[in-house]
Image (spheres, rainbow, N blue to C red):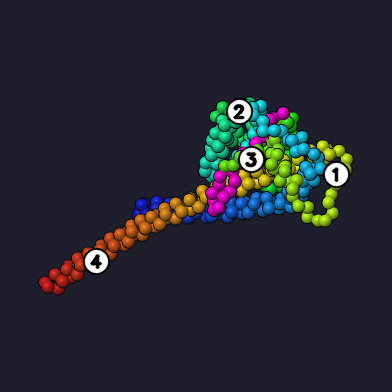
Amino acid sequence: MSDTQVSLRRKIDGAVKLESVVRTMKAVAASGIGQYEAAVRALADYELSVKLGLSVCFRQAGPFAAHSSSETVGGVVGAIVFGSDQGLVGQFNETMAEFVEKSLETLPGEKRIWAVGERLYARLADAGLPLAGKFAVPSSVNAITSLVSRLQVASEEQGAGGCAQVYVFHLRPMSGALCEPVRQRLLPLDQQWQKDLAEIHWPTKSLPELFGHNETTLRAFIREYLFISLFKACAESLASENASRLAAMQRAEKNIDSLLTNLNRTFYRLRQSSIDEELFDVIAGFNALSQKAASTWAR
């Protein structure tokens, strides 16, 4: 086997091993998508319970405007942004940072940003955006609850309670392996949203009543609503991260398949050429010996 063939064989073996790694990462990414999407679905019952509780509060607490800020213009605008610290996710952080920058430009007032992810934090800092805090990206569903709790505590300690508006930014998975950046306003509570909740039909004939301090109960339910919103945003962001990685692995697998096809075609062509050359040498040697033997017999 020639040096060129040996080199090609090594490249083919390396590509086969790399393809095996890519397929494993595809399986892990697909599993991660299902894991985080299942976490969002599992939160549905709890979310419904919180909404029913808010419905009772809004129904019995009087004017809606007493429990929400009006459509505030100006003031401090808080933003919680979810990014990724993993590799092989394409333009995940770049897309998120660009979307946040453009979105905040349209909102008047001072900005205050909490970033989830070291790489996203660096991107936002490079864009010159005012950063109030940085958090690590959770590595599993079980770690999301801890992150959301720390986000709530940190934002309250650093003044998010004084923000006129609070938004959450994240990537949401779409059909296939596509994702889209989305923005959700958490505070102030939309009055139409409150009205819609107050009109929710109670699932049983026994209507509930509030006991104790209505304001305290309402604040507790609002805190749980914010927790659910942040949990869903984080879970959807992690699902999008895995979807981006899955798409990257699919592209890599396609490229490796194409590379392997070309390498194998080249290898077998060279091998056939080598075999043909050896056959020609054997035939030429046989012909030469035959001619020599014929001349000897002729003498």
- Disc 4 to disc 1, C-alpha distance: 102 Å
Per the image, label 1 sits on a secondary structure element best described as loop
- Residue 263 at x, y = what percent? 39, 54
Name the residue located 72 percent from the left edge and 43 percent from the top edge. 195
Select label 4 or label 3 by which is in front: 3
Left or right of residue 285: residue 140? right
Name the residue located 44 percent from the left edge and 55 percent from the top edge. 257
Which label's residue is closer to the chain start, 2 or 4? Answer: 2
> Residue flagged by tag 2: what amino acid is it?
Pro
Dot 1 crowding, Cα within 10 Å, few <14, some 14–19, many 20+: few
Which residue lies under the disc numbered 3?
184
Which residue lies under the disc numbered 4?
283
Give yes or no for contact between labels 2 and 3 (Cβ–Cβ under 8 Å): no
Select label 2 or label 4 by which is in front: 2
The magenta stretch is: 162-180
Dot 3 crowding, Cα within 10 Å, few <14, some 14–19, many 20+: some
